[in-house]
Each structure stands twice: as structure tokens, then as C-alpha cells.
Image (tube, coloured by chain):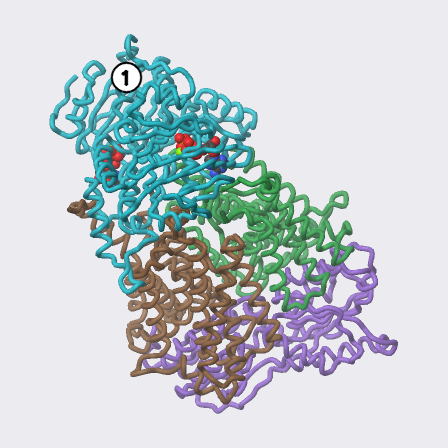
Chain colours: A green, B brown, C purple, D cyan
Amino acid sequence: MKHPIIDFSNKKELWHEITNNYSHWLSFVFLFVVAIVVSPAFLSWSNLTNLFVQGAIVGICAMGMSLVISAGMIDLSTGSSVALLSGLGVVVLNSSGSLLVALLFCLVGGLLVGTINGLLVTKGGIAPFIVTLATMSAWRSVINQLGQGGPFTVSPAMYQGFRNVAAGRILGIPHLMIFLIIISVITALLMSKTKFGRYVYAVGSNQQAARLSGISVDRVKALIFMYAGTLYGLAAFLLASRLTSIQAASAGSGYEMDAIAAVAIGGTSMDGGKGKIIGTFLGILMLRIIHTVLIMANVPPFLNGLVQGIIIIVAVLAQSKRKNK
Amino acid sequence: MKHPIIDFSNKKELWHEITNNYSHWLSFVFLFVVAIVVSPAFLSWSNLTNLFVQGAIVGICAMGMSLVISAGMIDLSTGSSVALLSGLGVVVLNSSGSLLVALLFCLVGGLLVGTINGLLVTKGGIAPFIVTLATMSAWRSVINQLGQGGPFTVSPAMYQGFRNVAAGRILGIPHLMIFLIIISVITALLMSKTKFGRYVYAVGSNQQAARLSGISVDRVKALIFMYAGTLYGLAAFLLASRLTSIQAASAGSGYEMDAIAAVAIGGTSMDGGKGKIIGTFLGILMLRIIHTVLIMANVPPFLNGLVQGIIIIVAVLAQSKRKNK
Amino acid sequence: GGTKEAGKKLIGVVTPSADHGFTAESIQHAEAHVKKVSAQYGYDYRFMTAAESGEQSNAVETILGMKPGVIVLWPVTGDELRSAAQSVMDAGVPLVVYDRFIEGLVPNAEISGDNVAIGEGVGRYFNEYFKAELAQGKVNYLEFKGDSSTVPMERTNGFLSTVDPKFTVVQSFVTNWSQQTSMEQMENYLNTKSVAEIESIKAIFTHDDEIVFGLVEALKNYRGPAKINIRLITGVSAGEGFMKLFENSGLTGIEFMTYTFSPSMVRDAVDLGVKVLQGETLQKEYKVPTEMIDKTNYKAYMQGDLYTTRYSL
Amino acid sequence: MILDMQDISKAFGSVQALKGVSLHVGQGEVHGILGENGAGKTTLMNILAGTFPPDSGHIFLNGEEVSNMTPMKAMNLKIRFIHQELNLCNDLKVYENMFLGEELTKKKFIVDKKTQIQRAQAVLDSMKAPIDANANVDGLETAQKQLVEIARALLFQSELIIMDEPTTALNNQEIENLFSIMRELKGQGVSFIYISHKMPELFAICDKYTVLRDGEFIETGRFRDIDVHRATELLIGKVHIDRNIKEGQPSFVEDSVVMAVKGLRGQAFHDVTFDLYKNEILFITGLQGSGTNELAMALFGASPLTAGEIMLHGQALHGRTIKQFMRNGVGMVPRNRKERGILPDLSIRDNTSLAYFTVKHKKLFISDKEESERFERNKLKMDIRSGSQSNPITSLSGGNQQKVIIGKWLEIDADVYIMDNPTQGIDVGTKFAIYELIDDMAKSGKSIIVFSNEYPEIHQIADRCLIMYKGRISGILNRTELSEVKVMEYSTGSIQGEST
Ligand SMILES: Nc1ncnc2c1ncn2[C@@H]1O[C@H](COP(=O)(O)OP(=O)(O)OP(=O)(O)O)[C@@H](O)[C@H]1O
Ligand SMILES: Nc1ncnc2c1ncn2[C@@H]1O[C@H](COP(=O)(O)OP(=O)(O)OP(=O)(O)O)[C@@H](O)[C@H]1O
Ligand SMILES: [Mg+2]
Ligand SMILES: [Mg+2]
């Protein structure tokens, strides 16, 4: 099972403590150093902020994914949900002419999308993997059908103002970076300071015991998907602003895998019950660092996947020595 | 003396028993009937055998996936492993000129690929999701690099003979159908009749209990990935024969999701510990029936994903009422 | 009903599934067209998309089981469909192959846009455009590929066959046809390469309009120390969005060029299928001509048939 | 088998669980290990059975030193270990669990299912355990699971059987059945190590004892040389005064009905009707299959009802969720700690706070300070032996985990407590403290329903005892009428009908 008898016995205790609780920091520092070695240009302000900017949209999704995984579930519908919401978001934006209406639409739409996942998992009693595999396929299909192959393009009237949401800066700090940080902080507080956070871990740890503690396991699961969905809505809004044109067939594709990878290399166990939001945050940055290194080092394009796979394994390996006996 | 715990006195009990243990049959029959209603031509011998032929390659992968999932793990590297092995398999075939050498190469290569997953999961202590996410990315990259964009094409000298492996028939029964049935029977026997099968379920059900019973959990996990890998090797060989040319970028892509979906709609719990091989077998056929229905009913192409998602949910929903409380 | 209706001839169409703009738009055209002609001539039709060759072979076989009068096949990748295509031919069913050809197989007809010609055209355009610089020495450019299938290969090979050897590719990216990917790749490039290296880039060769959109966004977002010396970015497709770049790209000093490669071409492939059903014999090969579009001729192009058909749906 | 463990030490981080402990067990001997919660009993056994290695020390079997013990090796050496916590694969069948890791095979690979079922059933029958060897384990109740764990150890010829609190969920009859099998095996030369916090059991079955305190070896000797009183003093390390809590006390039970249960019916029980009064401690007891297990869950809204009503302060609760039960003032300490009680990934502190969060916590944020104080309060009250409160709860000994769980429920300050086997795994000294605690709770206006099969416990604090037989109430005894014999008679169905 997932709770082997852990033996904290030997003298390396402190080291163990570090590798257990701060191992994602180790991986992060390791990658950071690699990046600097590959190219000192990595350290420029513009590049560092760029890591956040590029990580923001998937990162916001990954915050939702953190909750999902901490509760021992999974969500494969991330990318398709984002595509659906941002495509429709553009339509709403163009027709309403209001950024606020479009934002609200995306958030409420995301809530709805999350609710559907949540209901199928709880009321339907279907495994999250299957539910979200199905909704992944369904939402992509819906937005393709609505777009009929063409892109959803922000109208010229809205273009400048809308583009500025994602591309703009305040005091030199990119908006997207601010969005990512705010959502991360909110999620971190939610998970570490509220009882809802405890419920999430409790459900991921032992559902039966959670239920007998008065926790409505179904409600917690549904709320998790709703939170995640709402974040996907925000991500969709930002994606639309960043690209200003949403191609139904490909927008957001693969986001779920990036989000899951970020959560996992951030040190959250895929079995649920544990998980650190700061880890996910670092995880997102690590993924971005990997991408940047690939480009800086001019890795042959076809080999990117191999190098990326190896780096992920190494990063996680650094964290996982503890587990086995 | 026996003390039956389950008492069939109640009529509902029997129904419960059926929906618990044979629910995948219910879903199967349901889909089968839908298909016949959509088109009576569905019942032709050629169409029925076609279901097996089309399901064979993913089906063989799904047999491996059944073990992986029954042990509470997951394998995302299926499609990429198949691509890697079949691309290289074609190279070996062309240069050796021998079907047997190519087959052996694929099988041994598959064993190796599985071993790598297995070692990373056991010795590395990394979650299967992450390991196989990484190897998924890595193998695709490797075969892309080797192919440099071009396909791996069976040489004209080998073409006819090799194509016949997948396309041929014995006494009117397609080879692929025979392969699928043989592998399914072997896997079913392995899981229901041997010690190893017990261990797979035990590891999926309660790892700690398995370990305390003297089972080497690591060895079981590694063997599972090795078995799965070998089956991917066989699938790769058959895919190469079926397509006679392997495009590195896309070959086998999405097989893991199809295999997982087959396992899941076949009634195997994603949590591990349970699982029926016959269920997976039916699951594969159900996926094929869904595809056939989509074509026969002329569902608009962009809506295929939606319809498929809905059918999967309905099929699994039929099986899952029991779960709550 | 699933079987073809009694007495009606059946036309089967199998295409890749929608994974980026071009395939998605094409599917729309293909379906709309096959629906229209079927109604017009009293045919029945079956249409199926698939993401990968195994699945596509399955679709071909399933339709073959319905005894169609013709199959129009747009392979995910050419050679992988050889075996399935051969089954079609062996069954005596006429076969029209669109866009991606199957080596060693001679179907009743092949029809495609001319990818090699596009590449060659872009190469010649580069030579002309940078005549002055070439006289001085080498010219650096970046390449953003579609993916690793045959279409991008043909475009790149065509390009390399005509472009002056003094053009030097500094770095090459695989975008998977994704606007977002190309945008992020370009952003990373701009943020991590030396000023000298960035300033040395004069042109960008891409395989698709969508890729260009990503690059434009990335360039707009760039606020680093390097001066952008890029003067030409090329795409393929010549869709609506690219026309807007001619109007106002938001970037100064950069010009754009693209080649027509219309998703509506697939209609021609369907029409060939119809001709088969009407008993006409087909040529072995059809090439849909492609046309260079730049700021000099785009307005005329937008009034033309090709463009209006493309956006007729 | 003759076992010699010499100078065994083991530390978990900063906690020194064992400090140079030695243990000698002779052939055909039943050796009891006594010690408070956290004394190191389980740790010593885990080392013996190879669950993890010692930091230092030696193990000799029949005079030969064994190093690098693993669970597999221990099994091959004919050592069996019945773990303190249930370790069954709930997805497998009973016989599959029993043979796990040691399947009987035909032709080397094929599992011989038929023989396995037969042999498993034979062992279960010899224990008089009403369990079908072919049943699914997840359908079994806690006591049955514990019997399966025991049966598993009896399946193969073994030479040393380690039993770490094997009887926490069992009733007297089942324990007696177990003892008779143990005596028989002992006659055949099998040695036993027996760990329990139930004194009568130790005196009934064990020949020798070894006492551990705070990880240290204290004393070894023969049970026939000591009495219960002495044994208790040895293990708690101080003077112990036996007394009955209720004796000489006036009854505090008031006339007002707090909870009224009428015609309750579930899968395993029928027509259960009783009233629970203010300040009352009501015990409910019954044999395996009498329905008490499910009734306990039903009284907390955790198991579905097919008929009947539960009224609390005149308000209907049946059909409500667990949380609503809690909101209305019902708390429950469940049995089967590992599966229903603890949240293994959560810290000791969070485990303590969880029930409080669901019903009492109203603020937006959780305060670390409050949580910390909450745990410290309970630690003191219940004598919890723990390292840092941010360690996972699985770092505690079984008994200490149980104390955390009791504390977790005390925190919600309910009017009615349902306690299902609340003292499972708790040591003698603390047990008494918990009886006092329950008594104090009753005095201060709470009503408590305790599900228990231990007569000494009933005798200590029961105001009334309700006995179940085959899913129905077969008798109700007031404190004055209580006797072990009567309880037994009602629970075996040899007398029917309610006195009062
Ligand atoms: N896995 C572990 N990690 C850290 N500390 C542990 C672990 N297991 C046990 N301990 C500590 O070792 C000490 C001895 O525990 P052990 O389980 O042996 O006690 P015990 O005598 O069996 O008690 P009980 O009667 O409550 O079962 C305790 O202080 C406990 O907290
Ligand atoms: N939800 C259920 N569905 C079907 N049968 C059940 C259910 N719960 C219990 N049973 C069966 O009913 C019988 C009595 O169950 P119960 O657990 O209530 O007995 P018990 O007297 O509480 O046992 P214990 O002595 O362990 O307390 C058992 O045979 C059990 O298997
Ligand atoms: Mg213990
Ligand atoms: Mg009971």
C-alpha cells in the first residue's frame, strides 16, 4: 500500500528531512544551475520573467490539478476545457465588447465544466481518469464543431485592449506573472490554512476515515473539480488574450500532461494525501527552465522529447530515494 | 461447513451480483444492440471479424495494460513504445530479411522497454505515471530522431510476405483475430490461474500486506512492465505488418488512452486490486463497436469525440451504481 | 441507416482528424462538399476522420465492408496507409488519394497541393528578396517546421533545392503546427540568445500561417536589448489571418509572404471521386496549383475564387 | 523453536524505540510481552520478523544467529507474524489472502484453488470461525478480518507464532477458541509470542512474561509467580491501585431521554428499540454476527437503515448524513483503526483536529496555534507518547494512535458518543484513565453508548448493558443485574426477553 513502514532510523536524518520536505527545492536549484551553466543569458531579468509568463497559463491549470491529485484523483480534461472556454470566450468577447463579461463567462463556464466532471465522478461513481478522458474528448469535439475548423479570432475592435491583458506589464512586471503568483498564493492558502485543504488531503489519504469524520467525500471531490474548472476558465481567458486567436483543434492541447508533470516534479505524490502548492509552483518553473535549456543548448528538435524525459526523471529521482524501504 | 455471507434470498441480491461481476457484459450487450439497430449489416461475418482485426493491435497492448492497472499503476508509454519498436522492427526486417528475426527483435526490444519502466518505478521509486510520461516522450523522440521525419518503410522484397502476417487468414479467420484471442487467453490464464496473477492483484490491493506476505512487490511490478513491454513488442510487429510503413511522428499515438479506456470500460477498477481480462477483451470490442457505429451512423466528424465520450460514460455508468457507500 | 441505401452508390471519405487549423478547415470543406454532391447526384456517403494510421486503416476497412463505389483517402501519413489502400484496390474499389502520397502504390488518381513547389517558390523568393545581402555574404535565418511528417519534409526540401547556399539556418524548431508552441519557442529564443546572434537573423521560414501568428506575437512582446533585423517571415496557407498581417502586423520593418494552400482543395479530391462514380476515367495525377501571395497581390487574391470558396461556409 | 534476541536497539529518528532489549522464548512456550503503549513491543516483533532491521543486536534461532531477516526469510524459518494492524488485501478472497505468498500449486505454476479453499476452510472451521473461505474479504467485518489473519498463521506448520494484539476485535468465545488451538499447538512444540493489553488473557494463556518500559527491558519471569496487580505495576512502573470506578458512587443517570431509537432495522439487525438517558453509559454487546457492528455505524448515520427512527432530543436524525449527526451532537469512535480511523498521510495534529473542523470550526482560516494547543491538551489528558506533532500519525504506536482518535472525537464536545471498542490496543494504565474519562463525561451531562465485548470493561463503567443476539436485542441488564454469566447467556440466545 502507499504507507510503507518508513524507517527514519539512520543518522542521515536531517538529510532525509530535507530530501523529504524540500526535495522539490533541490531539483529546482539543480535545474537552475544547469540552465546558468548552459547560458549565462538565462539570468537576465527578461528571461526570468519570461519563465513566469510562459508558465502562467499552464501554471494556473496546475494549481487546480494539485488539488485534484492531492485528493487521489486525476483530470485529463484540462486542455480541452481550456480550448472550449477560450474559443467561446472569444465569441463572447467579440459580441459583448466587454472584457469583464468575457472574463465572467470564462470563469462561470469553467465552474460548469468542473461541475460536470465532479458530478460524473461523485454521483456517477466513475473513476476520474475515465470521466475526464471522456470529457477531454467531448469538449474538444464541441469546440471543433462550433469552430468548424476555423479559428476564433478576437475582433479588431477589441484586439488592442484584450491583448494587453496578457501582454501588459505593471511596473515592469508582466501581468501574467502577477496572475500566476496571485493564484498560487490563493491556492497555497486554501490548502494550508483552511479546513477545505485538510479535507482534500483527508480524502486523498483514506476516504473511509474521512467519511467517518463527517466529511462529505463527494462534496469535497465535486468542489475540487469546480475549483480546478474555474481556474481552467481563467487560464482560457488568459490564453485567448495571449494568442488573440484560438484554433479549436489544437488550443490547449497537452496542458493536462504539463500540469500533471508540474505537480509531480513538484513533489506531490500521485497517490494522493500529500502535496505542496509551492512544489507545483516550482514544478511549473522547472518545466519552463527545461524548455529554455533545450533552446539555449540548441538541442536537435527531434531530440527535445528525449532530453525532456531524462530531465524529468532526474529531477524526480532526486526526490524519491526515500520511498523504498 | 460453509457460511455464505451473501444471501441470495433477496431478489435484489442476484441483480447486484450480476451488476457487480458481469456488468461489462451488460455494457457490451447494450452497445451490440445499439449497433444492430443502427445497421443490421453490423451482423455480417465480415464486419464481426473486422471488429477483432481492428481491435487486435491495441487489444494486445490493453492486455498488458490490464496487469499494469490491476496492480494500481498506469502506463502512458504504450503508443511511443510501439512506435519505437515497430520503426526499428522495420529496419531489422529490411536488413535481416527474416520475419522471425524481426519478430524476436520486437519482442526482446519490448521486454527491454518494459524493463526500463519497471526499473525506474521500482529501483527509482518514481510514480508509474511520471516514469511512463517521461518514457513516452523519450521513445517518441528517439524514433523521430532516427527517422528524421521520413517513414520506415518495408522493403519491396519483404513487402508481400510481411504484409500477410497481419492481413492473412487461416480458414477464413484473420490472423490478427487469432493473435488477439491467443494473447487474451494466455493473459487470462496468467491472471486467474497462476501465483503471479494473485500477486498482481495483491500488490494492487494492498502493497504493504503483499510485502508482509513475503511477496517482492518490486519484482512483481517490474515483471508486470516487462510483460506489458513484450506485448507492446508484439503489437509493434503486427502494426508494422499492417501498415508496412511506420511514420515515427504518429505511429501508435494514442494507443495508451485506447488501452486504458478498454481496460476501464471492461470493468477493471483504476485503483487496482481487481480486474477481469475478459472485461478488457470486451472493452476492446466495445471501443471498436463505438467506432463502427460512428461511421455507420454518419456522425459529423467533429462530433465523433463528443459521441464517443458520451458512449464511454454511459457504458461505464451502467457498471458503477454499486460503488457509493 | 448504416448500409448504403439500396441502389445508391456509396462514396467513402477518410481524412486525418482535426489536429490543427489546416486539417480542421479541410474536414469542414470535405464534409460539406461530399454532403452536397451526394444530395445532388443521389449518392450515399460515409465520412470518417482518424488521428493515426492504424485507426485510419480501420476506418478504410470498415467503409470497404460497405461496398463503396469509390474511396477518397487523405492519409495521415502516406506510406502507412499502403496496406489498407492496397486492400481497397484489391477489392476492385476505385481509390483517390489526396495530399499525402503512398509510395509504390498507384491509385486511380492522386491529387495534392504542390508542397515541393511551395518550398521551391519560397527559396526563390528568398534569393530575390535578399539579393543585396547575398552579395555581401551569408544570410542567417530561422526555420519553424510543422512536424516530422512528409508534408513539412517536402516543403523544406523544396526550399533547400532552390535557396542560395549562402542562406544559413541558425536554429530549427518543430512546432507541431501549434501557434502557442512557436510563440513560446520564439520568446525563449529571443530571451536567451546573445544580442549578436539575434541581430544576425534576417528571415524566418515556416511551414504554416499559424506558426507565423505565434512568431508575430512573440516579436511584439519582445522588449530586450537586441535590435530585430528580421525582414521577412513566410507562411503557407494564405488564410484570413495572414491577410490582416499585410494590413497591419503591428511590427515595423518586417514583411510577410505566404503560399496559397487552401483547405478547400480537398473539394477537388471529392469531385474526382464523384467523377469516378459517373464513370469518367481519371488522370493519374492532379496538382492543385499554388500561388505566392505577398503585399503586392493579396488584395486581388482576396477577391478571387479560391479565397471566396474557402470562406464560403 | 528456541528464540534468543540479544541487545536489540532501534531508533526512529530521535525516538529511541528499543534500547538493548533481550528476549528469550523456549520451545513450546507461550511468552507474553507486556508494556505500555509505545514501549516498543511491536517494534521488537517487526525486527524479529524482518519488517525492518535493528540498529544493533543479534537474533538467534535454535542457537544459530540469523542476520538480514526479511519477511520472506522469516516465513521460510517457520515464523509467523500476526500484525497488530489488519494487513489483508480487501480485494482478494479469504483463502487467497490466507495463502498469499505461499500458494499451493499444481505443476509449479497453476494455483491449486480447490485444495487451497479446502484447507483454508478447515482451519477456519477448526477455529469455529463462521467465515466462508471463498468469500470476499471486503465484505467481512472487523472481527472476521482479525480471525482471518489468525487463521492465516495457522495454515502452515510453523514453529514460532507472533501474535501482536490478535484479539482486539474478538469476543470471549472467539478468544477461548483461539486459546484452545494455541494450547494444542503448544503441545506439539510450537512457541508463541503473545502481546496483549488484556490481563486476563495473558494470565490465561501465557507461561512466561517479559516486560518492556520505554524501550527498555525491565524483567522476565513466570506468570505463575505474579498476579495481575503485580503485572500492572511492573509495566506502568509505579504503584497501582485497583478499584472500580462506579463502586460506591451514586448513579448520575437522569430521567430525560437524550436519544430514542425505535424499531431500527438494517441489513444485520432488526427491531432495535431503546432509549438513552442523560448522563448514561450504555453498553451494547453481542457475539460475532449479532449485528452490533453495523448497529454502531447505523447510530452514527454511517450505515443505511431500512426502517425505524433515531430521535435526538426529540428531533429525527435517521436518513441524515454523518455530518448532520455530528452537528446535532453525536460523535463516534469507530472500530478498525487502520481502515476507518486514521488518515495515514496526515500529521498527528491534523488527525486530532479533523472532526473539530467538520462541525465546530467556523473561522475562515485554521490557526496553527489553536491546532497545536488542541493536540497538546489531548496529549496530556490521554498520555499520548509522540514525537513531533507534525509527524505522520503512522509514526505512533497502535495504542497511541487510538488515543489520538479518541481525542479527536472529544474535541467536538458531543452530547452523545458512540464508542465502538474504544480501548482497542490501549494499555492497562491508560485504559483505566479512559474509563475515568468516560465516567467524567457522563457526569458532566453526556450520554455514551459503548460497543464492547470485554466484560471487565462493562463491569467498570456500565450503567446499563444491552445484549444483542442474531440482530435483535435479547436482553437489557441494569448495573445491579450485571454479571458475566448473564451477559453470556443472553448473547448466546440461551435466555431471551428483556429484563429491567
Ligand atoms: N515507523 C515509525 N516511525 C517513527 N516512530 C515509530 C515508528 N514505529 C514506531 N515508532 C515509535 O517507536 C516507539 C515504539 O513503538 P511500538 O509500536 O513498538 O510500541 P508498542 O509497544 O507496540 O505500543 P502499542 O501497545 O501502543 O502497540 C513509539 O514511541 C513509536 O512512536
Ligand atoms: N451492509 C451489509 N450488507 C450485507 N450484509 C451485512 C452488512 N453488514 C453486515 N452484514 C452481515 O450481517 C451479519 C452481522 O453483521 P454485524 O457486523 O453487524 O455483526 P456484529 O454482531 O456487529 O459483529 P461483531 O461481534 O464483530 O460486533 C454479518 O454476517 C455480516 O456479514
Ligand atoms: Mg504495538
Ligand atoms: Mg459484532
Horizontal and vertical percent position of residue A303? 63, 67
- Looking at the image, can residue A229 be seen? no
Q: Is residue A144 above or below residue D416?
A: below
Question: Is A68 situated above or below C141?
Answer: above
- Give the residue number, with chain letter if any, for mark 1: D277
How many numbered marks, from 0 up? 1
- Say whether residue C270 is left or right of residue C137: left
Q: Residue at x 55, y 69 (%)?
A: C25
Looking at the image, residue D148 lies above or below residue B115: above
Q: Say which residue appears at 44% left-offset and 69% top-offset.
A: B230
Determine the secondary structure under disc 1: strand
Any atom of ligand 2 within 8 Å of the CB at mark 1?
no
- Residue B280 picture location, percent across and down: 35, 62
Q: Is residue A83 in view?
A: yes
Location of the C terminus of chain D (image quadrant): top left
Residue type highlighted by circle 1: Tyr
Say which of D17 and A307 sits in front.
D17
Quarter occupied by the N terminus of chain D? top left
Location of residue D274 by image quarter: top left
- The quadrant of the rendered image in which ligand 1 is seen is top left
Viewer-side residue, B18 vs D452 = D452
Which image quarter: residue C260? bottom right
Q: Residues within 10 Å of mark 1 (few under 14, many from 20)?
A: many
Q: Position of residue A83 (x, y in %)?
A: 55, 56
Residue B196 versus residue C12: which sits nearer the camera?
A: B196
Q: In the drawing, does residue B130 fall left or right of residue D481?
A: right
Front-lying residue, C170 or D66:
D66
Q: Residue B83 in the image: x percent, y percent?
A: 51, 71
Residue C21 shown left or right of residue A289 in the figure: left
Q: Chain of mark 1?
A: D
List the single residue furthest toward the right.
C136
